[in-house]
Amino acid sequence: MERVEQKKQSSCAAGPVTGALLRQALSVIQMMVTSCYGPFGRLKQIHNDSGGFVTTTSQSSALLGGISVTHPVLQILVASVRNHISAFSDCGLFTAIFCCTLMDRCLRLPVSTHKVIRLQHSLMDMCLTYLKSADCACKIKVDFTHSKSLIDLTRSVLCSKPACMMTIREVDHVSLLIVKAFLYKVPNEASPSHLLGRTLIVAVEGASIMDSAFIPGVLVEVPAWSRSRPIPSSGLPSTNIKLALFSGSLCGEFSDTGDGTVEVMAGVDPEQVILDQLIDVGRQLVDDQVQIVLCQKVIHPSLKQYLKEHNVLALDRLGAALMDPLSQMTGAQPVASLCSLSSACYGRLQQISNMSYGNKQYLHLLPDTTAVCSIVLCNRNETSLKELTRTCQTAEHTLSLLLKEPWLLLGGGCSEAHVAAYIRYKVAARSLEHDGGEILTDLQDGHVWSIPPKANDGEYTEAAHMCGCRLLQKSDGLQWAVLGSPCPLFSPRTRTEGSPDLLAKETLILDSFTAKCNGIRVAVDTASLILDLAYVVKDEN
C-alpha cells in the first residue's frame, strides 16, 4: 500500500533581494567569480557533498555548471550566465561579476530600486552605443588577410586559464593549431549553399602539449579490446571509399514497446528473424560495393563477421557527437532503421589510415573537400587536459563569432576602464588584481595600468610600463589616478594613437566584442530583473 502524505503549502517570501541570507550568498558567489578572473585568477576545486570526482578550474562554464544553488533568486543569476555561456562561450566570469556588482551597489544606495533600474538601462544603452560607434577607441577591426589578431585573441583566451598549465611556447603552439583549424573550416567563397565546417577535439592524456596536432578529417578511436589485433594498413580501403552511416542500432535488439506487447507466432524465433534481416542488410551493402560501415551504436557480431568476410570495414560505438560531422564531410545520410537503406544514403571518403597518439590508436578518415577537421590536444594529466579542452572549445567558438561581427575589444581591463571613463561610471576592472597591487588609469586614454604590490606610492608611475591590453606604453606627461578614486572628469580620446611598430610587434590582450557586448546586456537585464522582484513563491513539495 502506497504511503499518502499531506501536500505542503507553497511558501511566499516578500522582499527577497533584501534578505540577509540572500545578501550573504550573493557575496559568496561574487567573491568566487571575482577571484577566478583573469590570467592570475585563483583556481577553484568543485565536488559534491558525497565526494566523487573533483574539478579544478577557473572557467565559468565548469564553475557555474558544477555548483548547486537552492535560492530561487540566485538560480536566476546562475541560469542567465549559463545561457550566455552556452551561446557565446566567452565572458562568463565578466558577466557574473558585473551582474553581482550592479546588484551589490544598488542595494547600498539610498535610492529606490526602480530609479536605479532605469538608470542602469540608460547607462547600458550609452555604453553599447559607444562600443558600436565608429569613434570607439577600445575596439579593433579584424583583418582576415593577416592572422595576428586571430592569434592574439586565441592566446588571450588560453592565457586566462592557469589550470591549463602551459608555458608560453606551448600556448603559442596550441594557438596556431586553433587558428589553423578555424581558417580551415571557413569556406573560400561566400555562398548560401556553403556551410561552416566543424572542428572536433580529441583529448589525449599523458603526452606532451607540444605533441598536439591539427588533423584534417576525423579521428575515430580504435576500441581498447581490439588494439591487440589492429587493422593492418594493407587491409584498409585505398581511395574513393564508399561509406554507409548508421545512426540506429545494428545489434538486433527489440525496440522499446512501452506498455504494449509483442505477439510471436508459434514456431518463429524472433532473434533469428532479426538476425536474418541484419544479414540481408549486410548483403545489400556488399552488393552496393560499400567499403566501410560506421555505426553510432552497436553492430551485431554476426553482421560484423559477415562484413569482414566480404572485405567491408565495420566500426561501431562511435557516439552521437560524430554523426553530424561524419554526415557533413562524407555526404552520407544517417540511416535510422533497417528498412530505410538506399543507394542515395551512401557517402564518400578520400582515404583511411592508421594513426597513434600517446597510448591510443585511431583510424584517420580523410574527406575529399569538406572542411571538417580535428585537433589532437595533449596534456600531462587529466585535470589540465579537461581545462585545456574546455578553453580551446571557447577559443574556437570565439573565433567563429568574428564571422558575424569582425571586431575585437582591447583586453586586460582597458576596455572596461576606457568605457567607464567615457560614461562616468566605474565597472569591475579592479577584479583583475589579486596580489594586493594597485590599478591605475591614465587621464588621456582611460586604459588600465597594473602596479606591483611592493611599489611605493611615489613609484607608481615608474612601475607602470605598459597598459593592460599592451597597446600603449608609458610616455612623459601622462596624468594618473588610482582606479575608483576621485579624479578629474575627462573624456578619453576617441581614437587612440597607437604606434604602428607597437601594434606589429607586441602581442595584444584582446576580448571578444560580440561576447562582451552580450555579457553587458545580460548582466544589466538580470540584475534589473532580480532587483525588481517583490515576492518569491516556492513549491515546498
Image (cartoon, rainbow, N blue to C red):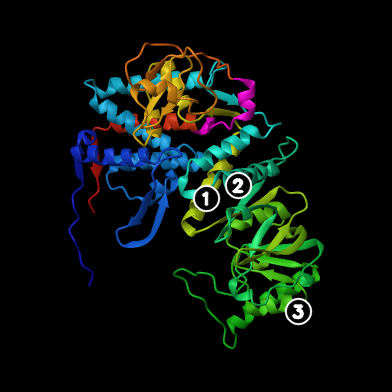
The Cα atoms of the two marked residues, 2 and 3, are separated by: 43 Å
Q: Position of residue 327 (x, y in %)?
A: 68, 55
Bin the neighbour count of mark 1 within 10 Å (Cα to Cα): few under 14, some 14-19, many 20 and up. Answer: many
Q: Earlier along the polypeptide chain: callout 2 or callout 3?
A: 2
Which residues are drawn in magenta?
499-515
Q: Answer with left or right where residue 371 lies relative to residue 97.
A: right
Three-letter amino acid code of the residue under disc 2: Val
Please provide percent x and percent y for residue 390.
51, 49
Task: Please identify, in this view, whether the residue under mark 2 or under mark 3 is nearer the observer.
Answer: 2
Residue 388 disc label: 1
Report which residue position mark 2 lands on: 174
Residue type at tag 3: Glu
Marks 1 and 2, how far apart at CA: 10 Å
| Disc 2, SS | helix
- Residue shown at 46%/68% (left/top)? 258
Residue extending farthest to the bottom is 267
Q: Residues within 10 Å of mark 3 (few under 14, many from 20)?
A: few
* 90 shown above or below 281: above
- Residue 83, x across and y down, in percent: 44, 41
Where is 465 relative to 19, above or below? above
Count of labels shown?
A: 3
Residue 113, numbered label = none
Q: Which amino acid, by three-letter code, is at mark 1?
A: Leu
Q: Quadrant of the C terminus?
A: bottom left
Mark 1 in CB contact with mark 2 (< 8 angstroms): yes
Q: Is residue 403 visible?
A: no
Name the residue beneath numbered marker 3. 309
